[in-house]
Amino acid sequence: MAAAPDAIAGTASPPRLNATRGGAGPHPMTERPSWDHEGRDWPNRDASLFVTAGGLRWHVQVMGSGPVLLLVHGTAAATHSWRALAPLLARRFTVVAPDLPGHGFTDTPATHRLSLPGMAGLLGTLLGALELRPALVAGHSAGAAILLRMALDGTIAPRAVVGLNAALLPHGEAHADIFSGTARLLVELPFVPRLLAWRASQASVTERLLRNTGSRIEPRGVALYARLFRHPSHVGAALRMMANWNLRPLLRDLPRLAPPLILVVGTNDRAVPPRQADRVRALLPSARIVPVAGLGHLAHEERPEAVAEIIAAAAEPGVPPAPPGP
């Protein structure tokens, strides 16, 4: 159901409808993360809920009070990505941050639902189950595309959409079909997610992968990514997302986006080239670009205080967010 326009000023109601604290019994460590094991010291664990919606059991973190702010992480990440940012934003907002389907501690849906419209639809069912209507939304990388799809479809009606190093152009651009075709081939080979998970279980491999994004995060953050990367279910969901991802319909529809779009761009992002923001603005001239100097693809993990200020400013009507100071 589409969110009513007047809901953008609303505040959160307590999550209800099949929401429980804590997790189920452990899953095999070789297949998917266990809340009792991998989640034993999960960041902001006290804010965690498990909610049934859309046929999936979701891991969601809810904290703070005030207008509802929805945070959506990117491919191969999870709620740990917001470990420092979410508590800062919770001083002003009711922060809602789910693990996307197949990621972290959320169930994996059928492969066809790991597409952009599929993920947007599933996230809409979660918001319906929680009876929440976001006043503001922020998404990292592919998470920004999911939020834009939801806004264009009328599932959400936020005051603004904030894209943190938003991945809105096809991988490889001219060669996008080759990239997605390769991902589909890999997904069809059942040993591939297990092989990649085995490789990524080595801390040095995870650290190198993250550093290749242009970001340097603290050892705790690296360890949390490695904790998830060693599970084939998590890696496999990321691969299936890549195989099913089609951004062309989103780009076609982008000019009719109603809420303002704010693109926060790390100038050292090696995963999503900063120049792509200019191409997005060519499609949507009203989009505002906010550069964050010297930060990479995981800018919100490198300097959470600076990113929190930008997001908070987006909630203020008529106040464009300014680039953070050095």
Image (cartoon, rainbow, N blue to C red):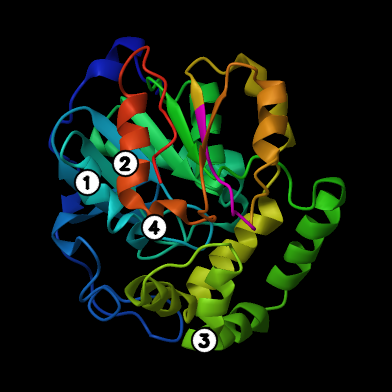
| Residue matched to label 4 | 301
Which is nearer the N-term, disc 2 or disc 4? 4
| Residue matched to label 2 | 308
For the record, the magenta segment spans 262-270
Asked which secondary structure carries label 2, the reply is helix
Residue kind at label 1, given as amino acid type: Leu
Q: Is residue 36 left or right of residue 192?
A: left
Residue at (40% x, 51% y) in the render: 300
Are discs 2 and 1 less than 8 Å apart at CB? yes
Question: Which x, y percent locates residue 179?
Answer: 79, 58
Q: Is residue 84 above or below residue 121?
A: below
Instruction: Tell me the crowding category of disc 2: few under 14, some 14 to 19, or many 20 or more residues within 10 angstroms, Cα based.
Output: some
Asked which secondary structure carries label 3, the reply is helix
Picture disc at residue 88? 1
Distance from label 2 to label 3 (Cα)?
Answer: 30 Å
Residue kind at label 4, given as amino acid type: Glu
Instruction: Tell me the crowding category of disc 1: few under 14, some 14 to 19, or many 20 or more residues within 10 angstroms, Cα based.
Output: some
Question: Which x, y percent locates residue 241?
Answer: 61, 56
Question: Which x, y percent locates residue 293?
Answer: 51, 47
Residue 4 or residue 142, whichever sits in front: 142
Instruction: Residue 168: say if magenta.
Output: no
Which is nearer the N-term, disc 2 or disc 1? 1
